[in-house]
Image (cartoon, grey):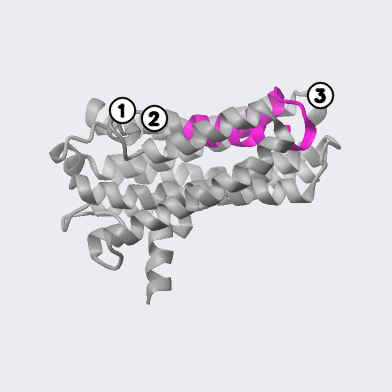
Amino acid sequence: MKIKSWLIAARLNTLIVSIAPVLLGIALSIEKNQFSSFLVAFLTLLASILIQLGTNFINDLYDFLSGADDINRLGPQRAVQSGILTKNQMKLGAYLCFLLALIIGFYLVFVGGLPILIIGSFALISAYCYTAGPYPLGYNGLGDIFVFIFFGLIAVPGTYYLQSGHFFDFDSILIGSSIGFIAVAILCVNNIRDVETDVNVGKKTLAVRFGKFPIIILYDLMMILPYFFIIILLNRSIFFMDYDLLLTFLSLPVAIKLIIDIHNKKDSQLNEVLFGTSNFLRLFFILLFIGIIL
């Protein structure tokens, strides 16, 4: 029973957000003949997953403590709120994930030096402060920025750097941004659904600050922008006229359907859009990964 409880708390469906950027960074290093270490690749992936798990656990705990997750919750089951895990268990789980990520981080810093120390420190601090601490990012309209920076601008270039030793690579930024946009779209759906309960507990997400409709438009933009970035990649020297990248456009009908859905669904119906957007990220990632490797 406890294993099932921890699996619920882990939010397995969301882990693709931390897995996809790392694997795409690895794929890019292979495409550019810069791949150097299976061990570093594995540890990078593991650290990324552990950081997201820790973030999910902290979010579960502090959303309950703040009152954001109560009996009126519209979203999927949360572990502490539903009573399947205690507050202390959740806190211990989060700290254990962060500790393991920190231990792995020592080795990655040994490999990558100061840039990885800065990236790792930023990731761990931001993961904790997303819903905890004196100024929770997610409670003050900064969650979207954090998600885009970490899962878009940092994870792919950081992974590529650990393999290649080249920190600034424009291709990795383009690829990372395309995934970062979709990660933000997932957060948009979550925040649109929870506007009413967030208002009641003083959680100032962008949807609370600006209203639902502007964030629906932001969602639309986040779902379409990745395709423009793929077109830019097609004009880069390493990918010039590499039509394999056009495989990503096979996912466009799914994106269009989700855009239509978010304009027409509300309240708990938005859970369908939330799960659909997570699955869309998975599909887009797989197609992009194949397109890079081929």
- Which residue occupies the foreground of this view, 196 or 242? 196
Residue 39: in magenta span: no
- Which residue occupies the foreground of this view, 189 or 247? 189
Q: Residue at x 50, y 49 (%)?
A: 99
Residue 167: in magenta span: yes
Residue 26 % position (x, y): 73, 43
Q: Pointer 1 and pointer 3: residues touching (CB < 8 Å)?
A: no
Residue where numbered disc 3 is placed: 237
Number of marks present in the image shown? 3
Q: Quadrant of the N terminus?
A: bottom left
Residue 178 lies left or right of residue 218; in this view the side is: right
Q: Please state the extent of the stretch shown in magenta in the rendering.
A: 147-176
Residue 255 lies left or right of residue 260; in this view the side is: right
Of labels 1 and 3, earlier in sequence is 1
Magenta part mainly helix, strand or loop? helix
Whether residue 276 is visible, yes or no, is no
Residue where numbered disc 1 is placed: 214
Q: Pointer 2 and pointer 1: residues touching (CB < 8 Å)?
A: yes
Within 10 Å of disc 3 (Cα), the crowding (few <14, some 14-19, many 20+) is few
Of labels 2 and 3, earlier in sequence is 2
Find numbered disc 3 in the image and state the secondary structure of the residue it sits on.
Answer: helix
How far apart are the two marked residues, 1 and 3, measured between alpha carbons? 37 Å
Residue where numbered disc 2 is placed: 218
